[in-house]
Image (cartoon, grey):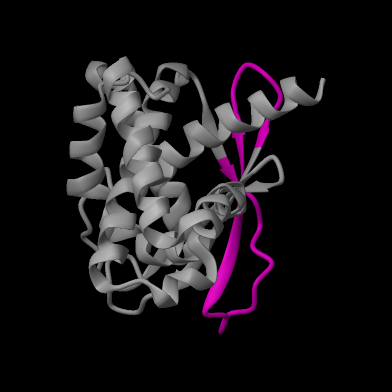
Amino acid sequence: MIASYRRTVVKTLALAATAACMAGAAPWAFAADEAPDAMIQRLSDDVLATIRNDKTLQSGDVNRVMAVVDSKVMPNVNFTRMTASATGPMWRKATPDQRQRLQTEFKSLLVRTYAGALKQVSDQTVEVKPMRSAPGDKEVVVRTLVKGKGDPVQLDYRMEQTPGQGSGWKIYDLNVLGVWLVDNYRPQFAQQLNAGGVDALIKSLSERNQANAAKGNGG
């Protein structure tokens, strides 16, 4: 039962992370910063519509997913912060080159792992729950429910305020069914970091990406 629950969490995390990573489906055209909950609702609706209308995304085509991520997603996600959080204290000891390589390999791992989850997108809708933050908060959690044929799935976003940049907010972590994406990867990263430092983690991520590419799927 625990194994089944873990598979459900990972599968849902996969879909959620891909959706968040693709959350730049519509170009920014706002004179003022959006409220974070309004941003998530708009982006959720946009990304679901984009996936439904793009057969190559539905097929899990890694190159297509990567292209969308590179061109539309990164402006909406603080991926540096996400990678640093997953890496932990060793991030501060990493050189600029190591940090860049870590981000590149981590992004590739996420995209390849989650590309297959796009096949599951069909009739889902997203309901944004009432905000619990104060008006002046610089960091907030936006809570949503992803609704489809089965039970609703909890999907929460940690966001930071970025005045004047894009919509005014960026995503830096995701929570699905009580599991934060960064917390999910931190212990995996720690194993490699403890064994051989930053270079060992980069090597491990690179090998996983190469193995996934050779299999032609997300592993």
In magenta segment, residue 142 = yes
Residue 132 x, y percent position in the rendering: 69, 67
Q: Is residue 92 above or below residue 99?
A: below
Residue 56 x, y percent position in the rendering: 23, 19
Between residues 83 and 38, which one lies in front from this camera angle?
83
Kindly identify the residue that appears in the image at 26 percent across and 32 percent down: 65
Kindly identify the residue that appears in the image at 55 percent across and 59 percent down: 194
Kindly identify the residue that appears in the image at 61 percent across and 51 percent down: 187
Q: Quadrant of residue 83?
A: bottom left
Screen quadrant of the C terminus: top left
Left or right: 83 as drawn, with respect to 62:
right
In magenta, the rendered stretch is 127-153
Residue farthest right in this picture:
1
Left or right: 191 as drawn, with respect to 94:
right
Between residues 99 and 16, which one lies in front from this camera angle?
99
Residue farthest front in this picture:
196
Q: Quadrant of residue 64?
A: top left
Q: How many labels, in total?
A: 0
Residue 62 x, y percent position in the rendering: 26, 27
Residue 46 seen: no
Kindly identify the residue that appears in the image at 53 percent across and 54 percent down: 195
